[in-house]
């Protein structure tokens, strides 16, 4: 997959391919990241990339001409790609949207700075607007890096074992189960016995039950969107019964 990123801070975005899973994917040729800086498309002596908002008020906007020239150049090199603007006004990013994006060959991510970009550039140039959540950060770069990371780990071959993105939390619409490693005891807290016994079906049942139970406790909104099968419903019923029992003890 090829991802082009339009940003005033290319050095910041590049760091996403310098570590871990995303770095390995880039080195394997699964991900090709290209960075484009609107500042390289300025023509004035000061290389100006900001401009004042009509109507006044605090803050600046990204200057239209260099940004538009940059977008045009990217599109010329990558004509088939969808262009996504990252902003709090966008569609909330969820695993389904990430997985869909990972099926595409190309993507262009546009990072805003200052107070953002002229609305007419959104109308004319932007195909989709995505949000990473209901909070404001100082620029689109961190949002783009989150997108790149989340998309890359869904590319076939990006994770060590081919099925581990399948096992990720949210792939099944649920939160993850708890995990334990050595030592067997930490400050008197023990590893659940079932994980030590080596009965694989019991381990699977326990993990699924914990995932269902935690989702029920912490994110009931996620559970409501799911149709549980009879095994899952039975495991959740057990979890709820155990929770009530241990609360009344
Ligand atoms: N939330 N999801 C987000 C954001 C920063 C000024 C427009 C978000 O995606 N991006 O908060 N972005 C602003 C900064 C320009 C984007």
Image (tube, rainbow, N blue to C red):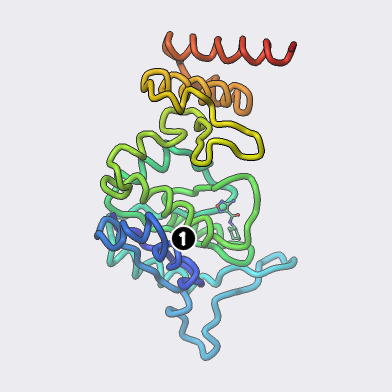
* Percent x, y of residue 152: 36, 51
Give the quadrant of ligand 1. Answer: bottom right
Which quarter shows the N terminus?
Answer: bottom left
Q: Residue at x 41, y 22 (%)?
A: 204
* Percent x, y of residue 4: 36, 62
Return the residue nearer the eye: 249 or 238: 249
Which quarter shows the C terminus?
Answer: top right
* Percent x, y of residue 145: 47, 58
Q: Is residue 122 above or below residue 246?
A: below
* Percent x, y of residue 6: 44, 66
Return the residue nearer the eye: 195 or 13: 195
Q: Residues within 10 Å of mark 1 (few under 14, many from 20)?
A: many
Return the residue nearer the eye: 51 or 2: 2
Place residue 190 in its image quadrant: top right
Left-right relation of 164 to 156: right
Mark 1, ligand 1, within 8 Å: the answer is: no
């Amino acid at each position: 997959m090829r991802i082009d990123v339009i940003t005033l801070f290319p050095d910041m975005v590049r760091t996403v391919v310098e570590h871990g899973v995303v770095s390995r994917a880039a080195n394997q040729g699964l991900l090709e990241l290209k960075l484009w800086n609107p500042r390289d498309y300025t023509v004035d002596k000061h290389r100006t990339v900001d401009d004042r908002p009509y109507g006044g008020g605090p803050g600046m906007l990204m200057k239209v001409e260099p940004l538009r020239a940059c977008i045009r150049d990217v599109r010329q090199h990558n004509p088939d790609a969808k262009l996504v603007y990252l902003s709090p006004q966008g569609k909330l990013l969820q695993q389904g949207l990430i997985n869909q994006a990972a099926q595409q060959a190309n993507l262009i991510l546009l990072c805003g700075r200052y107070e953002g970009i002229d609305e007419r550039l959104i109308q004319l140039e932007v195909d989709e607007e995505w949000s990473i959540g209901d909070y404001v950060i100082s620029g689109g770069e961190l949002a783009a890096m989150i997108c790149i990371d989340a998309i890359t780990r869904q590319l076939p071959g990006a994770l060590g074992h081919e099925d581990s993105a399948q096992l990720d939390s949210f792939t099944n619409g649920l939160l993850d189960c708890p995990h334990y490693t050595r030592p067997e005891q930490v400050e008197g807290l023990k590893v659940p016995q079932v994980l030590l016994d080596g009965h694989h079906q019991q381990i699977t049942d326990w993990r699924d039950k914990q995932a269902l139970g935690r989702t029920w406790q912490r994110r009931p909104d996620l559970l409501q969107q799911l149709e549980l099968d009879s095994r899952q419903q039975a495991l959740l019923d057990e979890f709820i019964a155990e929770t009530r029992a241990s609360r009344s003890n």
